[in-house]
Image (cartoon, grey):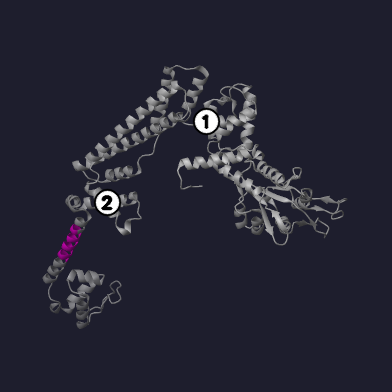
Amino acid sequence: MPLGYDADHVAECKHWLLERRAEERAFDAIKVSDLATLLELSKARDFAAAQSNDPRYGDRFLPILIQGDTGTGKELLAEAIHQIWARVVGSTKAPFEIVQIAGMSTDMINDELFGHARGAFTGANRDRPGRLELANGGTLLIDEVGDLPKDAQLRLLRFLQTHSVSRLGENTPRPLTVRVIAATLRDLATEVRENRFREDLLHRLRSGSGLRLVPLRCREGFFDDVLPELLKERHHAADPPLTRSARDALAIHTWPGNLRELVGVIDEAIAVAAGDTIRLEHLPAHIQRAYLELPLAGRALGFLLDDVDGQGLIGEHVAWRVSEINASLTSIALPPNEELQTIGKFLTLLDDSSAEHRQTVGSVARLLDLDRARRQAELARSFWKRVGAGPVPEVVAAHVRAAQQQADARWHHLGHEIDTEHRHAALDTHPFLRLLREIHGLPLLRSATAGELGSAFVALFNIVKLVAPTWIDQVRDDARAGGLARVRERIATALLSASENRRAEAIEATAESPPAAKLTREDWIEITRQFRSRRAAVQATGYDPKTIEKYLQHHGVPNPWKSGGLRRPMPSG
């Protein structure tokens, strides 16, 4: 939940929630230290004794829906809510019934929840009360309520509305006072949208937003606060209780089974360690494997602290370990800077042999290397800063501080080199890069990627250089002097000049041809035989189409291009 306050205010809120949890002994069995789960426990404490005033049926305790992944402690939370409620109403011996829906058939679910009368079906030899009746005066937890079939959903909805139930095979309603708590790992809002769960039942079960338990992998600080408590409860008295590498391996596991899975792993590790400190090799193989597959920088510190705790290592060994971690950090393969890579590819593909261009290409290659090295230095800088902020032995702390200072110095030095190379490369003033940036800023081309636009530019550049090599030099000078506007002027001037040249050539060709009036009938017949299209005749003679058609009619020569087709055979004479 994002709050518009600083970290101190959030810490104060968390402290208040921890105090509120500690005041309620019913929550003692629930392992929690993160803010999100503490908020849910605070809501649960308020919901436990909350009542609604129904004009038809009087005051009723609110039903509660608890959602969360398997193993997050939904049943523990439901039992704690029941204990708080029972204490408030003064009925500490009120029943707490649990019915597990998952895996049951529809008939079994109906019978389990609502019971049946004698003779209701074959084999019903006696009356059987359902779990709702057995929970009368107390609480019923319906676990995995998302698996209820549609007819059972309808019967449960009627019970929540009327607070009475009829056994299968009888018509007499039995009024009950039952607090219903429902739990599920399913997202019931999604189930409603996909027509697998009744929306009206969801609103009846969920008072407001209900309660939601976050998975273990999302609980910040869990392995710092709760894990030691779990070990202490199991009388694991080794000092230290577990090594740093074992703790780190537990912390990176995703825990699909949540707290239930963690408890099983801890119990196994304690048994394998036989009372000694729990080490990485005492954990299940799949948790070890995930940790050992990390890069060296991700696990070297854990091994270093393991050695310090177990052997009291001297400074030389610590220094060697730190140097190994630094080597690992600087060897991490980082992707190249995407913008610089695009610029480098663009410049490399340009067929430009000028000294300025070759110098810029080399500068971009050096900038790519410097940028990657600086980001690796930033990784090392952040890593050692994070390590130095945690609790580490003094023999390690001194070398960590030295490594952090070294990473800081390298980071600043590389930053200075990058600034110097940028000035040397002069990427902002390179004529074709400037031209490319201005083209990319045109409204019609803003959606194009830099790579797509660069490829199109390179293709056009190489074509122009092939047919007019000197013209490219002129465009380069124009781009340097005035950018896209100056290049546009040159292109417009070139197009205008070409148009005027074509017009002059046409006038000249027309002037050299004899006047149409002087051509004989035989001349016109020869023209229609010689040229297969009207366009070819127009280009060759310099006469416009109307003039040609006029003189063909005048001399009685059939027009073979009347329909725009090929020349037809001409009659003799």
What secondary structure is found at the residue carrying circle 1? helix
Which label lies toward us, 1 or 2?
Answer: 1
Disc 2 packing (10 Å; few <14; some 14–19; many ≥20): some
Question: Quick check: 318 above or below 126?
Answer: above
Locate residue 445 relative to residue 134 in the image: left or right.
left
Query: Could you tell whether 120 is left or right of 438 in the image?
Result: right
Task: Give the numbered dot on residue 248.
Answer: 1
Could you say where residue 94 lies in the image, as x and y percent from the top left?
76, 45
**Residue beneath disc 2:** 436
**Residue visible at 44% across and 30% down in the picture:** 389
Report how far apart the C-alphas of labels 1 and 2 lie in the structure: 49 Å
Residue 388: image location, x then y, percent: 43, 29
Reply above or below: 342 against 206. above
Q: Which residues, given as a range, are shown in magenta?
A: 489-502
Residue 499 lies within the magenta run: yes
Disc number for residue 418: none
Looking at the image, residue 205 lies above or below residue 518? above
Which corner quadrant of the image does residue 87 belong to?
top right
Q: Is residue 244 visible?
A: yes
